[in-house]
Amino acid sequence: MKHTIEYQPTFALLRVTLDPGDVLTAEAGAMVTRQGHVGMHTRMNTDRKAGFFGKVWMLLICLVRKLVGGETFFVNDFSAPTPGEVTFAPTMSGNILHKRLDGQSLLVQNGAFLASSGDVRMKLRWGGLRTLFAREGLFLLELSGTGDLWFTSYGGVVPIPVDGSFIVDTGHMVAFDASLDFEIKTPGGGIMGFVASGEGLVCEFKGKGTVYMQSRNVSALTGWLQPYLGG
């Protein structure tokens, strides 16, 4: 799908040109502008190919995704009878990254999904209790299939190829290939390293794939703001 990403890396804006027959799905609230002839259809954040009972089940999953996955309950589908343009922006001040999926799967953190086109499917993946301690919640959002995917970060986002072992602070983790295994652990340095280093927990990835990390940490931002918020 024809697109450009402008104002990178901190105030990114996604600009997409829709051709007749194109359908682009985006997080509710992500749209900035659209031309008048570009149509928008709002639906539940579920698989469009599911049958009746499948939709009932997906509705329950949708509720869980809203509560623990950080994603909205609804998404918007955009289409146009003639070529038309629509723009999107993430909630946080950060970057937008495009990835073409060709059958592989990507796991993204809470709220990182922005938009997709083609046959890209979303589902929750149980991350285990380790993701709870990693401040990512009990579930990760798994995106798979074939099509275009756009996801966001807080600050700049950097793709890092991994072949072996690589460690990332959990607060800087955005997404990673599902082919990678990961383990949540302390940063090292014994008890003092965990308590006094200020590093919290880290995520060690093993295998071969790509990790996407963000240059800023939302938890660090909220911690810095807390003394100024009062009550």
Image (cartoon, rainbow, N blue to C red):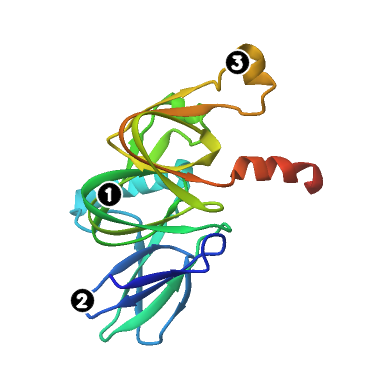
| Up/down of 42 relative to 139, above or below | below
Closer to the eye: label 1 or 3: 3
- How would you rate the neighbour count of disc 2 (Cα within 10 Å): few for under 14, some for 14-19, many for 20 or more? few
For label 1, the crowd category at 10 Å Cα-Cα, with few meaning under 14, some 14 to 19 and many 20 or more, is: few
Residue, disc 1: 56
15 up-or-down from 137: above or below: below
Question: Residue flagged by tag 2: what amino acid is it?
Answer: Gly
**Relative image position of residue 120 (x, y in whole percent):** 25, 55
Distance in Å between CA atoms under marks 1 and 3: 49 Å
Kindly state the secondary structure of the residue where label 1 is placed: helix
Dot 2 corresponds to which residue?
21
- Give the quarter of the figure containing the N terminus: bottom left
Quote the CA–CA distance across marks 2 and 1. Answer: 28 Å
Q: CA distance from mark 2 to mark 3?
A: 56 Å
User: Which residue: 44% across, 33% down?
Assistant: 138
Q: Nearer the viewer, residue 136 or 187?
A: 187
Q: Name the residue nearer the viewer: 59 or 32.
A: 32
